[in-house]
Amino acid sequence: MTTPSRKLSSARLTQPTNAFVEEFTASVQFDQRLYQQDINGSIAHATMLSSVGILTESERDQIISGLNTIRDEIEADQFEWSIPQEDVHMNIEARLISLIGEVGKKLHTGRSRNDQVATDIRLYLRDMARPIAEQLSRLQTALLNVAEREADTILPGFTHLQIAQPVTFGHHMMAWFEMLSRDAERLNDCVKRINTMPLGAAALAGTTFAIDREQAAELLGFDRMCQNSLDAVSDRDFAIEFNSFASVLMMHLSRFSEELIIWSSAQFDFVDLGDAFCTGSSIMPQKKNPDVPELIRGKTSRVYGNLFNLLTLMKNQPLAYNKDNQEDKEPLFDTIDTLLGSLRVYADMMGVMTVKPDNMRQAALRGYATATDLADYLVRKGVPFRDAHEVVGLSVAYGIEHQKDLSELSLAELQNFSSHIAEDVFEVLTLEGSVAARDHLGGTAPNQVRAAVAKARKILD
Ligand code: ARG
C-alpha cells in the first residue's frame, strides 16, 4: 500500500520542508485518533456537495466508497500513516486520491482543514461523552448500592477531621453521589455547546460555493451550526468547558480518594478496599497500599494541568485559526483517557469495598459524637442553647476523665450537670437515636438515606 509522497499543500513552496520541521509540525502521530470522525465528516461533506450539484452522484459514490475502504484499512491496521502528509486529514485525503484518482481531489471543495479539524474534535468529544457518561453512571449506581446496604451503618462524621456528629455510612455515600450527579449534569450541559457544527466556515470567511450547511449538520447529528465562520474555526472554548467539567469531576474523585486512603489506614480501619485494588510493598511485607485512590488523587493534577494548558493555549490567539490550535488535541485526549480509566476503576472498586461497622462505631463513641444531641435535648427542655452548650462541655470533660461515653454515664451522674436531664435522655444519647432524629430531607437518618436512594435510582434510570 502506498500513499503519495508528494505533499498536497506544497506547490507554492519551492524548497522541500526541512526534515525535522516536517516532523515537528506534524500532528498525525496523535490526531490519527480522529480518523472515524474525519471520515464521517468527509462523507457528509461529499453527500452535501452532490446534493447541491457541486459533485455528481457518481463522484460522490466513488468518494464515499474510497473513504469506507480507508476506514477498513485503518481498522485492519493496514494504513500507512505518513509524517510528510502532516495530519489525519491530509493522510486520508492523500490516500483517497491514490485509491480513486482525480475524483478524490474534488472532496476538499468548499472546505478547509480549519473547519474540518474543528468539526472532527467536536464530533470526537461528543462521541466520547457517551462512554464517559456511562462510566459515571456505573459509579453512581455502585454508590447507591453501597448506600442502600449501609443505610443503618453508623460512623463518626467529621469537621476539621475531628469527630463531630454520628452519620450513617449510606448518607456519607449519598453525599458523593450528589456531587457526581452535578458532574453528570455539567457534562450534559457542555455537550449541548460541543454539538454545534463549524463545517462551512472553510478557512475563516466561509465559502463561495452554494453549500447547504443545514444538510451537513443533519447528516452529522449536530444540533446547531456555528453562526460565525471566524468563531467556528478559531475558538476551542467547548474543549475548555469539557476539561472544566473533567477537572471538577476529578476534584470530587480526589477528595473521595483522600477519605478512602485515610479510612483504610490502620489508625482508622473503617473500610477494606479489596486486595484486587491494592498492592503490596516490595520491601515491607505487612503493607497493603491503597494505590488506586492514591493514583486517582495524583491523576487529578494532570487533568487540572490539561485545563490550564488549553486556557493558556487560547489566550493570545488573534482571530481566526492559528497553528497553535494543533496543540489542543493531546491535553484533550489525555483528559478523556484519564477520566475513562478513573471512573471505570472507581466503579469497580466501589463494587468490592467492604466496611467495618464495629470500628466505625468505636470511633464514634470515643469521639463523644452525640454531644450536640444532649445540648439539643436540653434546649427542648427549656434550657437556652448557650447554657446547654456549657452543661454538655462539662459532661464531656467528666466522661473523658472517667473514660466513658455520654451514653455510658448513669442518670445520676448526668443529673449532676443539669436538673433538666431525665430518663428519656438515653434515647438521644445513643448513636442510633442521634442519627434517627435527623429525619428530614437531606438529613442522615436511615429512613432518609433509603428515600434518597430510591429517588436517585428513579432519576438515574
Ligand atoms: N493539524 C491541524 C490542526 O490540528 C489541522 C488544521 C491545519 N490548518 C492549517 N491551516 N494549517 O489544527
Image: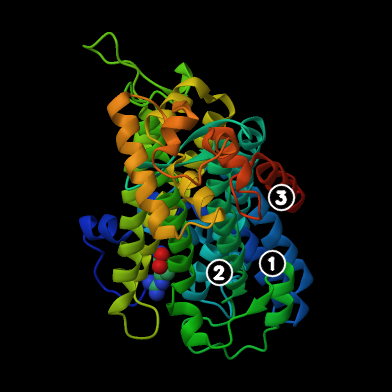
The residue under label 1 is: 220
Q: Distance between the residues labelled 3 and 1?
A: 28 Å
The percent coordinates of residue 351 (x first, y second) are 59, 28
Task: Return the residue nearer the eye: 57 or 357.
Answer: 357
Query: Which residue sits at x=40%, y=84%?
Result: 320
Query: Number of callouts in the render?
Result: 3
Residue 239 or residue 76, whichever sits in front: 239
Give the residue number, with chain letter if any, for mark 2: 119
User: Residue 148: image x %, image y %?
Assistant: 67, 35
> Residue 460: which disc?
3
Neighbor class of circle 1 (other Cα within 10 Å; few <14, some 14-19, many 20+) is some
Mark 3 CB lies closer than 8 A to ligand 1: no
Relative height, residue 411 to residue 200 (above, below): above
Q: Which of marks 3 and 1 is in front?
A: 3
Q: Which quadrant of the figure has residue 101?
A: bottom right
| Amino acid type, label 2 | Thr
Is 339 rendered above or below residue 306?
above
Label 2 residue SS:
helix
* Picture quadrant of residue 400: top left
Does residue 97 appear in this view?
A: no
Q: Is residue 126 left or right of residue 292?
A: right
Q: CA gap, disc 1 to disc 2? A: 10 Å
Residue 327 position within the rendered picture, expressed as x and y whole percent measured from the top left: 34, 63
The residue shown at (63%, 46%) is 137
Q: Residues within 10 Å of mark 3 (few under 14, many from 20)?
A: few
**Residue 348 higher or lower than 334, as above or below:** above
